[in-house]
Amino acid sequence: MPPSLNHENRRQYPETPMPNVDDNEEENFLEIETESQPNSLFHNAILILCIGVCIAHLVTIWTLRADVNILLEYQKEQSLQYQHISTMLEAKQQLQWQIVPASK
């Protein structure tokens, strides 16, 4: 026959400590969670703005480099023309100009 489980035979365990949680603390915890969402929204907006500025900066540098390369080629072409003219003048070759009659 199993032993009877009356109040005297049961082991006495110490009472388990429970955290002191008030209803106000639960509400405060919920408020903290809801407050962090706009903060993360602001953080995400700033992050997207920074990424956009970086992309715009890279595109601007890319187009400026292309423009500088075009200008360097134009300058190289002009300097070659000036060198050609100066070598012709140094060689004392006479430049021949031809007058073209206007067509009617």
Image (tube, helix red, strand yellow):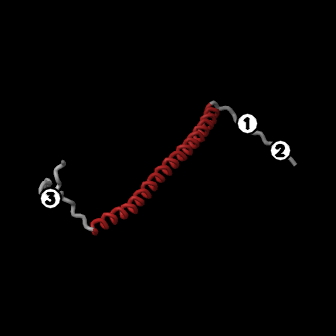
Residue that appears at 36% across and 61% down: 36
3 up-or-down from 36: above or below:
above
Bin the neighbour count of mark 3 within 10 Å (Cα to Cα): few under 14, some 14-19, many 20 and up.
Answer: few
Residue that label 2 marks: 101
Q: What is the three-letter code of the residue carrying label 3?
A: His
89 up-or-down from 65: above or below:
above
Q: Nearer the viewer, residue 19 or 50?
A: 19
Q: Nearer the viewer, residue 1 or 46?
A: 1
> Marks 1 and 3: in contact by CB < 8 Å?
no
Could you tell me which secondary element the residue under label 3 belongs to?
loop
In the visual, does 15 lie left or right of 22?
Answer: left
Residue that label 1 marks: 96
Q: Earlier in the sequence, mark 2 or mark 3?
A: 3
Q: Nearer the viewer, mark 2 or mark 3?
A: 3
Extreme residue in the front direction: 1
In the visual, does 90 lie left or right of 101?
Answer: left
Q: Earlier in the sequence, mark 1 or mark 2?
A: 1
- Residue 14 falls in which quadrant of the image? bottom left
Q: Earlier in the sequence, mark 3 or mark 1?
A: 3
In the visual, does 8 lie left or right of 78?
Answer: left
Q: CA distance from mark 2 to mark 3?
A: 132 Å
Residue that appears at 42% across and 57% down: 46
Q: CA distance from mark 3 to mark 1?
A: 130 Å
- Residue 29 falls in which quadrant of the image? bottom left
Picture coordinates of residue 74, whole percent (x, y): 60, 41
Q: Which mark is residue 64?
A: none
Residue that label 3 marks: 7
Q: What is the three-letter code of the residue carrying label 2?
A: Pro
Q: CA distance from mark 1 to mark 2?
A: 16 Å
Q: Nearer the viewer, mark 1 or mark 2?
A: 2
Bin the neighbour count of mark 1 within 10 Å (Cα to Cα): few under 14, some 14-19, many 20 and up.
Answer: few
Query: How many marks overall?
Result: 3
